[in-house]
Amino acid sequence: MRKSVRRPLAALLFALAALGAAAPGAALAEAPAKQTLTLTNTAQRLADCALIVDGKIRNLLKIHTGKTWADDFDPRRTLQLVCERAVKDAVWRVKPGTTYRFVDAAGRLDLAEGAAE
């Protein structure tokens, strides 16, 4: 009788181990490819900004006039951009896979979608 009790238990443990080993691979297979967020400064002033990912500051950026910054992000993440000397109360929600440019707006920074002109 002992053998019949041990075999189902061993089979159950083996099945659980197999599921545990397969689960990380399945989770990785479902993750979407990272996409590039590109920021170009076409304004006449330094763009001094913080990039916030899922509510936490990830990067402090200083993008000089005529320069471009880019990085790859998971498209499921929430990305926000907050800059000094920006238009009033500006917190921009930006999307990976998109190109943005800083522009002058009455002595302040504004953000526009699209490549530099």
Image (cartoon, rainbow, N blue to C red):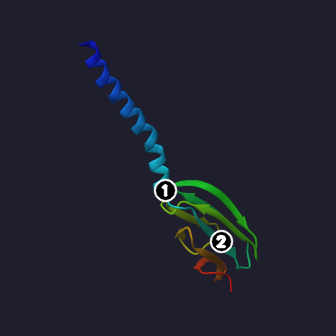
Left or right? Give the position of 39 relative to 27: right
Tell me what residue is drawn at x 60 percent, y 77 percent.
110
User: According to the image, label 1 marks what residue?
Assistant: 31
Residue type beneath disc 2: Leu
Secondary element at image label 1: loop
Task: Tally the numbered discs.
Answer: 2
Q: Position of residue 38 (x, y in %)?
A: 64, 70
Q: Is residue 113 visible?
A: yes
Q: Is residue 111 above or below residue 26?
A: below
Observer-side mark, 1 or 2, equals 1
Left or right? Give the position of 81 relative to 116: left
Q: Position of residue 11 (x, y in %)?
A: 34, 28
Residue type beneath disc 1: Ala
Of 70 and 63, which appears nearest the observer?
Answer: 70
Q: CA distance from mark 1 to mark 2?
A: 24 Å
Left or right? Give the position of 66 relative to 24: right
Q: Is residue 4 above or below residue 72?
A: above
Q: Residues within 10 Å of mark 1 (few under 14, many from 20)?
A: few
User: According to the image, label 2 marks what residue?
Assistant: 39
Q: Position of residue 1 (x, y in %)?
A: 23, 13
Of 2 and 97, which appears nearest the observer?
Answer: 2
Tell me what residue is drawn at x 48 percent, y 54 percent.
29
Displayed quadrant of residue 103: bottom right
Q: Position of residue 18 (x, y in %)?
A: 41, 36
Tell me what residue is drawn at x 36 percent, y 28 percent.
13
Q: Which mark is residue 40?
A: none
Looking at marks 1 and 2 on the same chain, the residue that comes earlier in the sequence is marked by: 1
Q: Is residue 48 visible?
A: no
